[in-house]
Amino acid sequence: MKIVKKIARFILRSELAKMRRTNASLSFQVEELSTQYDKVNRHLEEIQRQIDELSQRFEMRPKVLINERMLQCLSSILPDPNRVALRYQTLTTEQLKRDYSTGYTEYVKGQSYNIKMNICRLVKNPLDKNEVSGVEVFISCYDMKIIIPLRKEKKTYRILGVETEIETYFYDFYESGLRLLTGSSWNFMAEFMRAQFDMFTGGVVK
């Protein structure tokens, strides 16, 4: 009887040891799978972030044709990009329309048109509502709305052997999708646009 008990205890110890090894192996596999899942999940989140960023950039880049006068006026009304990005709470919609606006007179086929340009709103980052990703500018008469994106970059300059690093926000005109027309090319397009506008509105100037 004692021999039978010894054999039974031996078998039980062997089975328990095998179960512990199996459980340890399963636990290790679960941990490995959990680690791999976290890595894949982070990778997918990064891919989604890049997709969202690219989608945002494509949305902000409708191709808009402007002339050199529009470009000059646009540059003159843009507020300090670092203030817009870092202290946008201090800029109200009313202040933007009042303080960051300009105008000029354009002549199309001998007729004068008063063009007004102003910043109508700050564009929030769709990925983070607490950030501003650009400004939207309205151009009357042509009923244009142009979004100028904000970007931040860190640049290193070497001056007289000394390296200086500068991190700043800037207006990204490339991403805005602006296209410049000058001379007779713009005049021809402006005549066409005015004729189309007059046909739909009865010639009422905005």
Image: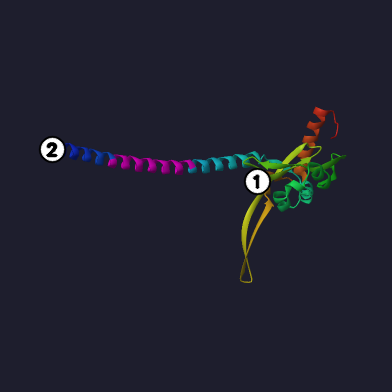
Q: What residue would you read off at disc 1?
A: 175
Q: Which residue is drawn at 18% across and 40% down?
A: 10
Element assignment for label 1:
helix
- Amino acid residing under circle 2: Lys
In this view, the mark in front (2 or 1): 2
Real-space Cα separation, disc 2 to disc 1, in angstroms: 87 Å
Residue that label 2 marks: 2
- Decide if residue 170 is on the left or right side of residue 28: right
User: Residue 114 at what x, y percent from top left?
Assistant: 86, 41
From the viewer's perspective, is 39 left or right of 186?
A: left
Task: Return the residue nearer the eye: 83 or 35.
Answer: 35
Q: Does the magenta stretch include residue 92?
A: no
Compared to residue 161, the image places residue 50 above or below, namely: above
Q: Give the range drawn in magenta.
A: 20-41
Rendered position, 127 above or below 159: above
- How packed mark 1 is, by other alpha carbons closer than 10 Å (few <14, some 14-19, many 20 or more), is some
Q: Residue at the spot x=45%, y=42% of the render? A: 38
Q: Position of residue 130 (x, y in %)?
A: 67, 44
Q: Tell me the tag on residue 86.
A: none
